[in-house]
Image (tube, grey):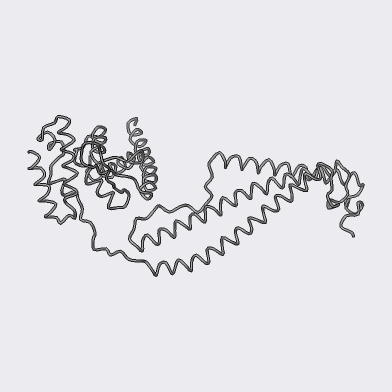
Amino acid sequence: MNKNEFLSILTSVLEKNQISDAAEIIEEYEQHFAFKLADGYSEEEIAARLGDPEKLALQYEKELLSVPKQSGILTKIGLGFADIFAGLFFLLLAACGVVIAAAAIAFAAVGVCMILGVSPYALVPSIPYWCGAMIGVASAALGVLAAAGCIYYWALIRQLIKSFGRFRHNTIAVAEGKPVLPSLPAHVQLAPRTNRRLRSMALIALILFAVFFILGFAASMLSAGSVGFWHVWGWFVN
Amino acid sequence: MNAQYKKGVLELCVLSLLKKKDCYGYEISEYLSRHIDIADGTVYPILRKLKSDGLLTTYLQEESGGPPRKYYSLTLPGREIYEQDRADYLKFAHAIEKLLEDDDHE
């Protein structure tokens, strides 16, 4: 079979099956012949290696031209409402995230002040230095724990927003008959290394907090000679 | 091998090549027939199907001393679907391989 025979069989079967833009398909095979001929193959060899033209033509599926491109306007209106609720939800989640971040900073700041033995604006109540330093370490550890939690929490919000964005995209794509992307998971996606680090950071902070809080509490009780040492040192009274 | 099954795997191979760089049809055909025992013509229907599914786009590029070539390029959905299908396929192939190897030792 030579080039012309191959192409004419291909063309006739494509046309019989009403495949759209058969010319473009034929063009690809013509180029294939051109490349191979330039490499020194004969038309017969090339046609034989291409395969049976009738079988090839049957591989082309009829495109579903009858599917009209819908505007998906109803879907978009519906999504608009979903956006309002989702937006408020994400705003609420973000507000909680800000609170956690603020708590982390506050705990860390108090901890550092107590370790350094300073009391800006007399905000830290009076306490013997060593007792204060131990409670300070506990507070700083709590700050680190809250920071780790905060990072994880923000990663979660980010993933939720991305997941919702993909859901929106796919909903519109379905309505308009466009290709759909794989949906995204709605749980935190961290690199395994980041995940491990975050987890060990939280664990160490938790242990430090527990140990130093108990030590600081015990030292304070011993130092004040009373279980309710805060009464002895006159805390919480104006 | 089952033709339908082979076609699915070939789609994955085409996407994998196009993830690395844009190629014209003949380049893809040559690449595949170098690695896998298939008729040279098989790749063209696959390219058209992937294009009509929205995984690929085409553009024409002028070549010195010749007609412009039709280049195939991966779209964003194509890229994501490739990554997912690749992971699925590798998991599947690994499981089958283990299964068949176990059979060997019994």
Count of numbered badges drawn on the protein: 0
Tell me residue A27's x, y (percent).
17, 45
Q: Is residue A76 above or below residue B63?
A: below
**Residue positioned 63% across, 40% down in the render:** A200
Relative to A183, residue B10 above or below: above
- A100 or B24, which is in the foreground? B24
Is B13 left, or right, of A81 in this rendering?
Answer: left
Which quarter of the image is occupied by the C terminus of chain A? bottom right
Q: Which residue is drawn at 77% across and 44% down?
A: A112
Q: How far from the left and from the top, in percent, is residue A125? A: 86, 51
Q: In which quarter of the image is residue B39?
A: top left
Position in image of residue A17 (x %, y %): 14, 55
Residue B43 lies in quadrant: top left
The residue positioned 10% from the left and 40% from the top of the image is A3
The image position of residue A69, as x and y in percent, is 30, 64
User: Could you tell me which residue is drawn at 60 percent across and 58 percent down?
Assistant: A94
User: Would you place residue A152 above or below residue A88 in this image?
Assistant: above
Point out the residue furthest to the front here: B65
* B74 or B94, nearer to the observer: B74
Instruction: Using the image as rendered, state which of residue A120 and residue A67 is in the foreground.
Output: A120
Q: In which quarter of the image is the N terminus of chain A?
A: top left
